[in-house]
Amino acid sequence: MPTLDKRNQPAEQDMHPADIKAALQKRGYSFSRIAREYGYRSNSPSNVLRMPWAPMEKIIGEILGTPPNKIWPSRYDAQGRPLRSRFR
């Protein structure tokens, strides 16, 4: 009987930044709109595409209807907790 060995399975990939932007656009959002609605500087929300930022990941996850750990699996542990945050 074969055993399930996760070491031989490929790691889940983060969603491609272009796919995140396209998914936001399909829902009528841009990073500028997110900045206005949530009180961030206009260029700040796009930083989440390059670096971990748990609060912004949560906002984008809510907009997309997808948990942040499914969008950026490399940034979360097995329990869905952020591994690190931009703000500590």
Image (spheres, grey):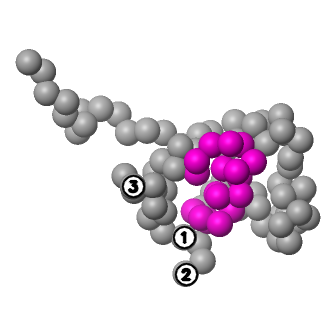
Query: Where in the figure is residue 61, as x and y percent of width and height?
Result: 66, 50
The residue range painted magenta reads 52-68
Residue at 75% across, 57% down: 46
Query: Where in the figure is residue 60, as x and y percent of width and height?
Result: 71, 52
Q: Residue tagged by mark 2?
A: 88
Q: Residue tagged by mark 1?
A: 85
Q: Residue pushed farthest bottom?
A: 88
Q: Amino acid at mark 2?
A: Arg
Left or right: 2 as drawn, with respect to 58: left
- 2 and 1 marks in contact (CB < 8 Å): yes
Residue at 71% across, 58% down: 59
Residue 72 in sight: no
**Is residue 77 located in the magenta-colored stretch of the structure?**
no
Residue at 35% across, 34% down: 10
Query: Where in the figure is residue 45, as x and y percent of width and height?
Result: 76, 61
Question: Which numbered mark, 1 or 3, is in the foreground of this view?
Answer: 3
Q: Residues within 10 Å of mark 1 (few under 14, many from 20)?
A: few
Q: CA distance from mark 3 to mark 2?
A: 20 Å
Secondary structure beneath dot 2 equals loop
Q: CA distance from mark 1 to mark 3?
A: 16 Å
2 over 39 or under it: above or below: above
Q: Amino acid at mark 3?
A: Gln
Which mark is first along the chain, 3 or 1? 3
> What secondary structure is the magenta-colored segment mainly?
helix
**Is residue 63 located in the magenta-colored stretch of the structure?**
yes
Quadrant for the N terminus in the image: top left
Q: For residue 79, which numbered disc appears in the image?
A: 3
